[in-house]
Image: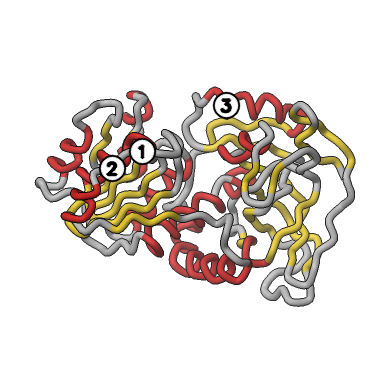
Amino acid sequence: MKAALRGESGLVFAEVPRPVPGPDDVLARVRAVALNRADLGVLAGGKHGSAGGTGTVLGMEWAGEVVAVGAAVTGLAPGDRVMGFAGGAFAEFVRADRGRVLPMPPGMGFEQAASLPVALMTMHDAVAVNGRLRAGESVLVLGASSGVGLMAMRIARHLGARCVIGTSTDPSRRARLAGFGADVAIDTADPGWPEQVREATGGNGVELIVDQLAGPTVAGSLVAAAIRGRIVNVGRLAGMSGTIDFDLHALKRIEYLGVTFRTRSAEEVRTLSSRMWADLAPAVADGTLSLPVSEVYPFAALGDAFAAMAANRHFGKIVVTLG
């Protein structure tokens, strides 16, 4: 089968063996793949979990049709339209553990479906599971204009958040956050942003911060958080390290949690996936939890899609179609 790999010096297309599903696997014909920041890192020679290095088939988020299922897989059959999050997606066929495959709602296209699995799983885990959002609480999403950031705001609103605040350093993107659930849009390049968050919450601060930035914004997050607030670190787009006021952290009794799917077992992922789908499937089906698809490229123009991702001018998801 044809696949896109990380070659010695970048992107290459090559013929590779078609995956063979194990007892817990689903084999799918890929119709569309959405790009993620982690794909850029792997293409550049880095690692994302166990994926990385020369010869790695790129891509981690896809939609397509089931071709075969393992003996332990129930509820899915050849011909079913599905979406999933699993490595090796930029290929004609992809193999994924059953816990990483979700049914596509009737009427949904492959391009929209490919944009959803990573955002749904990541942000349900951050907002509902680790963030423990309760109806009536306030939420701050740092780095809200990315696909997962937009989904975080929509999930928070869907689960009953009283006030949703999103951040972006780009004024045109900030102007669009209201359409995805933000009551307030803030620029973290403004040194006064933590106080703006406090003002938006009546001086109390936010109960939950979903942090995709980290780095130098961590100190401000402690200021913006309410007493007994929770900060869930999902990403580190602003930097891998930062300085915090440990006394303020203690005074406010803030919980600071780090999350990733890279170190979770297959069984953990299956449990979280089942819980997410039980909570969110109706809202996915009716379009409440959707994402904008910014650009669509054919598989042959994958290099252009990666360049568009690296340029960071898109709003929403970049999707590549495979026929």
* Residue 4 in the figure: left or right of residue 283: right
Q: Nearer the viewer, mark 3 or mark 2?
A: 2
Is 271 rendered above or below residue 171?
A: below
* Residue 278 in the figure: left or right of residue 78: left
Is 263 rendered above or below residue 197?
A: below
For the residues labelled 3 and 2, the Cα–Cα distance comes to: 30 Å
Quarter in which the C terminus is drawn: top right
For marks 3 and 1 on the same chain, the one whose residue lies earlier in the sequence: 1
SS for tag 2? loop
In percent of width and height, residue 117 lies at 56, 53
Crowding at label 1, few (<14), some or many (≥20) Cα neighbours within 10 Å?
few
User: Which residue in the protein does label 2 denote?
Assistant: 244
Residue at figure coordinates x 64%, y 29% from the top left: 306
Is 25 rendered above or below residue 309?
A: below
* Residue 28 in the figure: left or right of residue 111: right
User: Which residue in the protein does label 1 denote?
Assistant: 242
Residue 268 seen anywhere in this rendered image of the structure: yes
Q: Which is more toward the observer, 21 or 260?
A: 260
Residue 143 seen anywhere in this rendered image of the structure: no
Q: Amino acid at mark 2?
A: Ile
In percent of width and height, residue 10 lies at 74, 28
In percent of width and height, residue 132 lies at 33, 64
User: Which residue in the protein does label 3 denote?
Assistant: 310
Q: Are marks 2 and 1 in contact (CB under 8 Å)?
A: yes
SS for tag 1? loop
Q: Amino acid at mark 1?
A: Gly
